[in-house]
Image: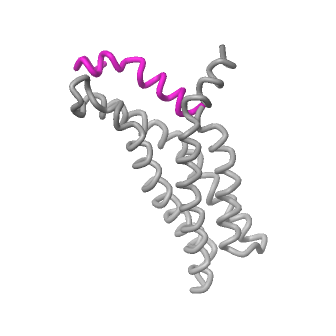
Amino acid sequence: MFKDFVKESYKKDWPTMVNNLTSNGLSIFSASVASGICDNLEYSTETTTGIATLVDFAAFWGTFIPQLMYRDKEYLKDEKGNYSKNKIKAKAREYGSMFTLLEGTYLIARPLIQYYLDKKGLDPALASAVSQAGIITIYTALLPIIRTGIKKLSNKNLDDLVNGEEK
């Protein structure tokens, strides 16, 4: 059963991995540039790490969610071809769940890894890129499973939600 779930996840959500990598590429570049600028301005390690994390966060989610919304646009429509408020609400819950799960762990792990690497003497821009790349590798590998699981959970009551019966 779990094996089938994993197969289904990767089959259906393979494009999500591409969206994830695109957004992560932009966020790695942006956060590394921000870290390099902070280093040139002689900001503290803590300030550099904080700024890089915020830039990373904005660059990733600012490009990832719009890509998912574009891919999910047909799902958001009702049988008449109009956007359904309830389907949009259901998708927002799905995206919010994914955001909470991923960012909850990422916003703890990323700055700790970058801070550690900075303190060990690694160039701040490289420390930023290395910390992101390590976590991104894990997330990209697991993203289809995470997204499919969240979809299954959020779609469990979708019929009730679409029919206006919220639980």
> Image quarter for residue 83?
top left
Q: Is residue 121 above or below residue 56?
A: below
Which residue occupies the foreground of this view, 6 or 71?
71
Q: Position of residue 144 (x, y in %)?
A: 58, 34
Residue found at the far right of this picture? 120
Q: Is residue 1 left or right of residue 83?
A: right
Residue depicted at x 30% and y 16%? 160
Q: Position of residue 131 (x, y in %)?
A: 68, 59
Residue depicted at x 71% and y 53%? 134
The magenta segment: 145-167
| Rendered-image quadrant of the N terminus | top right
Q: Is residue 124 magenta?
A: no
Q: Is residue 88 left or right of residue 154?
A: left
> Image quarter for residue 24?
bottom right
Which residue occupies the foreground of this view, 81 or 88?
81
Which residue occupies the foreground of this view, 43 or 102?
102
Residue depicted at x 58% and y 67%? 29
Q: Position of residue 121 (x, y in %)?
A: 77, 74
Q: Position of residue 7 (x, y in %)?
A: 65, 24
Q: Is residue 140 above or below residue 33?
A: above
Residue found at the far top of this picture? 1
